[in-house]
Image (tube, rainbow, N blue to C red):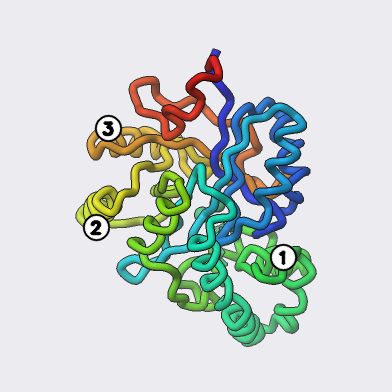
Amino acid sequence: MSLSIDLHTHSTASDGTLAPEALVERAHAHGVQVLALTDHDETLGLAPAAARARALGLHFVPGVEISVTWEQRTLHIVGLGIDADHAGLNAGLAQLRAGRETRAREMARRLSTFGFADAYEGALQFVSNPALISRTHFARFLVQQGHCRDMQKVFDRYLGDGKPADVPTQWAGLDQTVRWIRAAGGRAVIAHPGRYRLGKRQALRLYRQFLQLGGCGIEVITGSHAPEQCATYARVARAQGFMASVGSDFHAVGDGRRELGALPPLPADLTPVWQGWFEGEGR
Ligand code: AMP
Ligand code: MN
Ligand code: MN
Ligand code: MN
């Protein structure tokens, strides 16, 4: 029997709606045996999540999802198996988070031009970690107010990459990001590659640069991929020599995205990103 593994999830430490402990409990209840918490640009949830996982006998992988600007676009790089207390990594992440409040105020200003008043205060109602206000919190507010039917509509019209209320942001460099993750003892993984709409040559450039910098993985199975995209990125993993990762990208119960522990298995010939992690544990 194969392990149930989920290596990409969010808690209230970033834009998820479950507290880290509650996330771990839900994963456990859904049969997940190996879980990574990967909040955006933040490690705050890792200690409480690890403690709850220990109590439940679930294998916990400390992680993070870092916002990156590469060739003028935003990418997400997941770090897995990091030391949550690593000073260099945490200093870098703190710097990344620091720009979010100004960015959020500008988002609110832009949303006001569409007739949506007080979006900053509105989004704040959904924020648990004051250092991490994100587009997701604005989207939840616009849905709550009845301005949009669902989150997808908000991103399609206003907040998605390049849409009018998406404020261009300079995130971390790809090289810097891979260095932080590696310095903290982690494996760097390209998150949801199917979402970036890169041209063939640009995608190849990303894969080669990333591997050269010391990145090693790519998400093949993710809640963001349609079945045919899983097949596409399985081929990419084989052709480029990536380790393959699996994650729901769970944010909230019933938000139309993947539930915890509901992911198809990785094609058997791929090298899993967790290779070597469970040695000596009889797995
Ligand atoms: P931010 O870190 O503030 O740029 O917010 C990015 C977050 O917005 C992502 O991590 C997703 O949770 C969410 N997001 C982005 N695009 C979409 C989308 N099309 N539908 C739903 N959520 C999205
Ligand atoms: Mn998110
Ligand atoms: Mn992401
Ligand atoms: Mn994510």
Residue 242: where, in percent of width, then height? 31, 38
Q: Nearer the viewer, mark 2 or mark 1?
A: 1
The type of residue carrying mark 1 is: Asn
Identify the residue under disc 3: 238
Residue lying at the far left in this picture: please name it.
201
Q: Residue at x 46, y 77 (%)?
A: 168
Residue 6: where, in percent of width, then height? 57, 35
User: Between residues 66 and 184, which one lies in front from this camera angle?
Assistant: 184
Identify the residue under disc 1: 129
**Looking at the picture, does residue 185 appear above or below residue 221?**
below
Left or right: 83 in relation to 220? right
User: Between residues 9 and 52, which one lies in front from this camera angle?
Assistant: 52
Q: Secondary structure at mark 1?
A: loop
Identify the residue under disc 2: 202
Q: Earlier in the sequence, mark 2 or mark 1?
A: 1
Q: Earlier in the sequence, mark 3 or mark 1?
A: 1
The type of residue carrying mark 2 is: Gln
Left or right: 18 in relation to 232? right
